[in-house]
Image (cartoon, grey):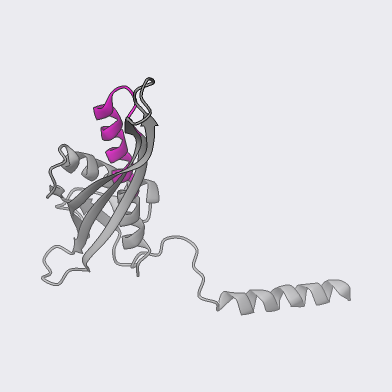
Amino acid sequence: MRKIHLAALAAFLLVVCGGCGYRVGSLMHPQIKTVAVAPVQNETVEYNLTAQVRNLLCERFMVDGSLKLVDEKEADCIVYARVTDVRFAEVSWAKNDKDRDDIFLPNEWSVTLTIEYSVIIPGRVQPLVAARKVTGTANFETGPDQMIGRLNGVRQAAYDASKNVVSSFTEGW
């Protein structure tokens, strides 16, 4: 008798929980199966961002797995992105001269990268996703080679922004 009660309770929970609106798997629109990433535009003075951001967007779409990444000619939708802003800020300071107490230089920085993106279905005038802005941030240390530290920080911020683009698009229905 106890087994029948447990089975009835389990069946009841399945029926009740099945109607809560939860989904397993991709949250994408069922008619959109493939995506392409158009060349990225850079509207900042920071160099080498276009290829880097496009590669990271492609990587994030492949990791996400909701859509198959294909060429623009075969895609159900195309992501157009442009980098609109890159900002740096000092996070922490270090003493520069051991003999003087008044000379400090920043040794840790924060970078914020802003990407505006839209998604277009080829052949349609109205965008699938109108222009949206996302940001990515990262902290980095300058170390002995300040340019390498800066480039790595920008790459980390671009990765974070790319992750936000993909999740905003694939989960934003």
Residue 78 on the magenta span: no
Q: Which sits in the foreground, 168 or 16?
A: 168
The residue sitting at the top extreme is 99
User: For the magenta stretch, what is the residue range?
Assistant: 141-160
Task: Name the image quarter holding residue 120.
Answer: bottom left
- Magenta span: chief secondary structure: helix
Q: Please identify the quarter of the rendering in which residue 126 is found.
A: bottom left
Up-down: is 58 above or below 140?
Answer: below
Quadrant that contains the C terminus: bottom left
Out of 24 and 85, give the one closest to the viewer. 85
Across and down, in percent, residue 67 comes to 33, 55
Q: How many marks?
A: 0
**Residue 124 vs residue 15: left or right?**
left
Residue 133, image x, y percentages: 25, 61
Which residue is depicted at the point 34% across and 31% down?
Answer: 102
Compared to 75, does 140 lie above or below? above
Q: Quadrant of the N terminus?
A: bottom right
Q: Residue at x 30, y 34 (%)?
A: 152
Image-based side of 53 in relation to 122, left or right: right
Tell me if residue 145 is in the magenta stretch. Answer: yes
Kindly tell me whether residue 67 is visible in this rendering: no
Answer whether residue 19 is visible to the viewer in this image: yes
Q: What residue lies at 24% left-to-right and 53% top-to-bottom?
A: 114
Task: From the viewer's side, name the closer residue of 105 and 149.
Answer: 105
Q: Position of residue 143 (x, y in %)?
A: 34, 26
Residue 92 shown left or right of residue 111 in the figure: right
Q: Is residue 45 left or right of residue 15?
A: left
In the rendered image, residue 56, in percent from the top left (x then y), is placed at: 28, 43
Quadrant in the picture for residue 121: bottom left
In the image, farthest residue toward the right? 1
